[in-house]
């Protein structure tokens, strides 16, 4: 007959006691599932906020409805504004203002334009496309990529988009912020926007996010018959800028001047 009292206790006995509820409250730390739950709780507590709820479709819809009330009527443009997350294109410290109708700094003396101004310019392009029987903006050239927000909208509205940025830091920033959207019809180019982008010309739609004293000849040369160019240009009241619209048809070029705007200056070369 053996003496069982001299044998070491079997480890499973401790787990058995816990399972039967016989352990003291302090022994609950032995339960593996409690450790897992604590880790999950800690991870949720430490996880950074996702834009104060700005990733919600409802937030963008409210912005769109405000723009509609203020007179933006192009349904394709409103739909694009509802799909593209503007808060992903602004500095993290400014996300709370992402869906207000205001321009915001993006660094290097540049800004992301007000949603109402972006919507107005895109609506002018869309208006021309529909007038000549196109369902989209066709081949698009954007001058001034900036943070990439307008380029993302153009990707929703156009068949193919080339967007040029002269500041390398902004070009790289736009690449980073546009990557999650996986817009395969969008090409970003680092270069001098005043030269346009001849390899993929002519373009059905050209839009500029910077204004100068004149329109660069390359832009007009690269505008297709039936196409439209929308750009800020000097000539507004008290030396300001206005929105200039140029259409090309079989007879040549026709221009219209619209409301006053304020954009950064158009510059030559690259940084």
Image (tube, rainbow, N blue to C red):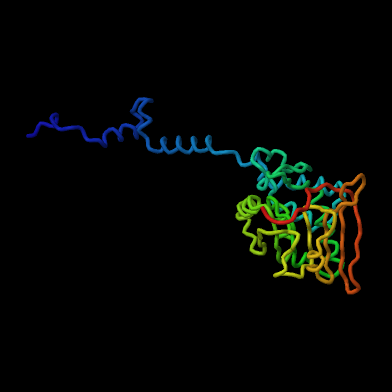
For this rendering, which residue is in front, 253 or 6?
253
**At which x and y percent is residue 90?**
68, 44
For this rendering, which residue is in front, 261 or 199?
199
Q: Residue furthest bottom?
A: 250
**At which x and y percent is residue 133?**
84, 70
Residue at (37%, 25%) from the top-left corner? 26
For this rendering, which residue is in front, 13 or 267?
267
**At which x and y percent is residue 105?**
71, 42
Residue 223 versus residue 32 in the image, above or below: below
Rendering quarter of residue 166: bottom right
**At which x and y percent is residue 129?**
83, 65
Residue at (13%, 30%) from the top-left corner? 6
Q: Residue furthest left?
A: 1
Residue 17 versus residue 194 in the image, above or below: above
Residue at (68%, 39%) from the top-left corner? 94
Residue 271 versus residue 139 in the image, above or below: above
Residue 201 versus residue 53 in the image, above or below: below
Image quadrant occupied by the N terminus: top left
> In the picture provided, is 198 more to the left or to the right than 75?
left
């Amino acid at each position: 007959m053996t003496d069982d009292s001299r044998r070491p206790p079997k480890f499973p006995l401790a787990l058995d006691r816990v399972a039967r509820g016989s352990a003291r409250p302090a022994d609950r730390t032995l339960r593996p599932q409690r450790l897992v739950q604590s880790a999950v709780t800690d991870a949720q507590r430490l996880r950074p906020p996702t834009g104060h709820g700005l990733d919600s479709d409802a937030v963008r819809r409210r912005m769109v409805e405000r723009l509609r009330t203020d007179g933006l009527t192009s349904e394709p443009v409103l739909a694009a504004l509802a799909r593209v997350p503007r808060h992903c294109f602004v500095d993290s410290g400014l996300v709370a203002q992402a869906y207000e109708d205001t321009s915001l700094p993006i660094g290097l003396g540049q800004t992301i334009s007000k949603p109402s101004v972006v919507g107005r310019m895109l609506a002018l392009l869309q208006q021309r496309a529909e007038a000549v029987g196109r369902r989209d903006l066709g081949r698009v050239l954007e001058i001034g990529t900036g943070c990439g927000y307008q380029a993302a909208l153009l990707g929703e509205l156009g068949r193919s988009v080339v967007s040029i940025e002269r500041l390398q830091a902004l070009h790289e920033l736009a690449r980073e912020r546009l990557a999650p959207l996986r817009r395969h019809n969008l090409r970003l180019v680092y270069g001098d926007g005043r030269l346009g982008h001849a390899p993929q010309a002519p373009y059905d739609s050209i839009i500029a996010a910077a204004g100068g004293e004149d329109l660069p000849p390359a832009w007009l040369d690269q505008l297709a018959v039936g196409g439209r160019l929308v750009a800020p240009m000097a000539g507004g009241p008290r030396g300001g800028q206005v929105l200039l619209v140029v259409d090309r048809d079989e007879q040549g070029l026709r221009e219209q001047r619209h409301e006053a705007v304020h954009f950064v200056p158009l510059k030559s070369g690259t940084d």
